[in-house]
Image (cartoon, rainbow, N blue to C red):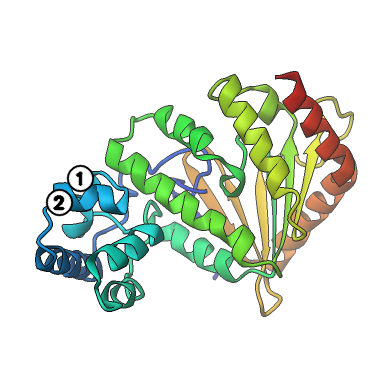
Amino acid sequence: MGVHERCPEVTDSTGGFDGAGPGSGSEPESSDSLKGFGEVVKVFRNRARLTQEQFAPRVRYSVPTVASIEQGRRFPPTDFVERAEEVLDAFGALRAAARHLSRRPGLANWFRQWAKLEKEALSLYTYECRVVPGLLQTEAYARTLFLDQLPPLSDDDIEAQWAARAERQRLLGERPHTAYGFILEEHLFLRQTGGVEVTRGLLDHVLEVAELRNVEVQIMPLVRKNHAGLAGPMQLLETPEHRWFAYNEAQRGGLFVSEAKEISALQMRYARMRSQALSFDDSVSLLQRMRGAL
């Protein structure tokens, strides 16, 4: 790969863009494996003599969601697979079929490369100045971002985006040996995106995540004379082979960076920001005070 690779239509979490759903043209393609999984669910549902209307509440999903999964249009969340396996007594067939699915929900094709690296990373460092990163978002906060997206997202898009984000968030608990570092601008919480209740929930969640031994959260204070991150947000990632990659985002474009010289410059900036931001203890104290003031 060259110095860097531009990725159009940035979508996230954290699809790609942590603050929005997919732009036009970035919806992940369907696949034979998804259609095949849907057919397996339908066969076992019919075997159990359940209609979609009867099956949906048992797996705690809506009828339209069940229909989309059976038609191969939506990637099944992990909890759907587990609940369907139990409800339909599927002999492990649904779990086995799910392991071979080739589409990630809410992730554009180009973002899969970063998402794959993220799942195996030894360390992942994030600086964010626009929105709270997808790995730290609550459902209420994320849905606020989705609802504000322009062009507007459909209900199916929103569900797919949240499913993708929730799946990625499992990494924080499932990979205790991965070091996660977050430098967040203080104004991300002062803005109160979604309102007071959403912000309270977000602060509670970030404080809870910060208790994990493999997670470090630092706050960049609102007033700061010097700031090494004024060029914008960044993510730095170390692979099990000790290779480093970076990913930067803009309004409607992303930059995947692999060239050592470019990575070195970003590492220097992140290291400087760590010294400019509040310490971990001071950051937690500030978040607690902000929570108490709401």
Would residue 130 be visible to someone looking at this image? Answer: no
**Residue closer to the observer: 187 or 261:** 187
Q: Are marks 1 and 2 in contact (CB under 8 Å)?
A: yes
Question: Is 124 left or right of 25, judged from the image as shown?
Answer: right
Question: Mark 1: few, some, or many residues within 10 Å (few <14, many ≥20)?
Answer: some
- Among numbered discs 1 and 2, the one appearing first in the sequence: 2
The residue drawn where x is 32% and y is 42% is: 157
Amino acid type, callout 2: Gln
The residue drawn where x is 47% and y is 56% is: 167
**Residue closer to the observer: 253 or 204:** 204
Question: Mark 2: few, some, or many residues within 10 Å (few <14, many ≥20)?
Answer: some
Residue corresponding to mark 2 = 52
Residue 51 in the image: x percent, y percent?
11, 53
Figure label count: 2
Q: Which image quadrant: the N terminus?
A: bottom right
The residue drawn where x is 34% and y is 58% is: 80
Question: Is 294 left or right of 116, judged from the image as shown?
Answer: right
The residue drawn where x is 40% and y is 29% is: 147
Of helix, strand and loop, which one carries label 2?
helix
Residue corresponding to mark 1 = 63
Q: Which image quadrant: the C terminus?
A: top right
